[in-house]
Amino acid sequence: MSQFKSLQSLRKRQSPLAQTERQLKLLEGGIFTEEDAPRFEERILATLKAPLRSKQLDILQVNLGYMCNQVCTHCHVDAGPDRKEIMTINTMEHCLKAIKSSKVKTLDLTGGAPEMNPNFRWFVTQAKACGVDEIIVRSNLTIIVANKKYHDLPDFFAKHGVHVVSSMPHWTEEKTDRQRGSGVFNDSIKALKMLNDVGYGQAQSGLKLDLVYNPSGAFLPGDQNALSAEFKQRLDRSFGIQFNDLFALTNLPISRFLDYLIASENYDDYMWALVDAYNPAAAQAVMCTNTLSVSWDGHLYDCDFNQMLQMPIQDERQHISEFDNDLMNGRLISVSQHCYGCTAGAGSSCQGAVA
């Protein structure tokens, strides 16, 4: 696969749309040619005896923009400081209308760094007024200490009872910085302490702080319970940091991670690892069946991974401004080979992903 050695320079020359079209073509069989791999939709039909369909809509996952203060090697959103895509307040208002007209229980805010959207706090307060049971913010932690205008985010989160879900690749500086950038570990520790100081992760506080672990290479995550116990022991012993749960998520073969797999000649082996780890029980509980993903420009997807590959929902109403809750139930879920990532082992979609 030497033709893919300069993949990163190619990415820089291509538009985001051209990049997603190229990646989807690869996933649909462009380089998966050494052996005949079972198509994901065929595996679903064989094991579940029916295609994946949406159920009652419980979660509205909203991407507030691809701008981020970090550039992480595994990022499926391809987020960074140079990304200018940002959700407008008009699109947010359509999201609020959808919440009011549906039975959505959870608003899940992601990015990029969702906190960098200038209307982020307004959106949280308005959503809270709509009566959703839970608001999740997928924070990269370092945004809290990146600029003084974000230093009060822990207090804002606590005031509104926001559930904070944050990426933490490892309990060591070396492995964390290797995946997320120099200095990220120390800034993450500072941010976690700030969250602990206002009650997050503390017993009886009611303020939930969960961490997300993604492997740093072309391999699947280990046992989630064992990883959680190890993280809790290490972070408490070294820094006095407390958190609620840790979720071990599989890196999906899209965006920067797909580029890495191809350039490092690990793509075929990794895809077969996902195929071999397929778990029918995990397939029955994938997040896309009760979630609707809204892109920064208001378009609708079954999940944020499909959003990155420009695979819209299978319905003629594909924008949040056209939302109709009755049309959200029972639709076919759009799938491709990357979906094996959410059905491998214990599954990766119970809590979604952090950019």
Image: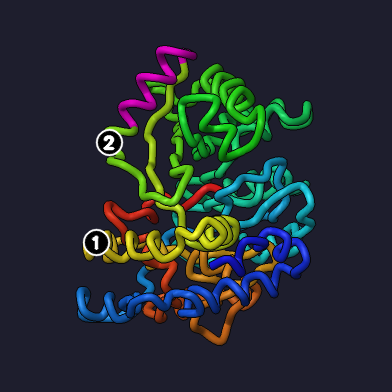
Which residue sits at x=49%, y=14%? 239
The stretch in magenta equals 228-240
Q: Is residue 246 visible?
A: yes
Residue wearing tag 2: 225
Report the amino acid beneath label 1.
Asn
Which residue sits at x=37%, y=79%? 330
Report the amino acid beneath label 2.
Asn
Residue 191: quadrant of the picture: top right
Q: Secondary structure at mark 2?
A: helix
Compared across the picture, whether 121 is left or right of 191 comes to right
Q: How many marks?
A: 2
Mark 2 / mark 1, whichever is N-terminal: 2
Classed neighbour count for the residue bearing mark 2: other residues with Cα under 10 Å, few (<14), some (14–19), many (≥20): few
Which residue sits at x=48%, y=73%? 27
* Percent of width and height locating residue 321: 65, 74
Seen in the picture, residue 253 relative to 214 is either above or below; the reply is below
Residue wearing tag 1: 279
Q: Is residue 97 visible?
A: no
Which residue sits at x=52%, y=50%? 131
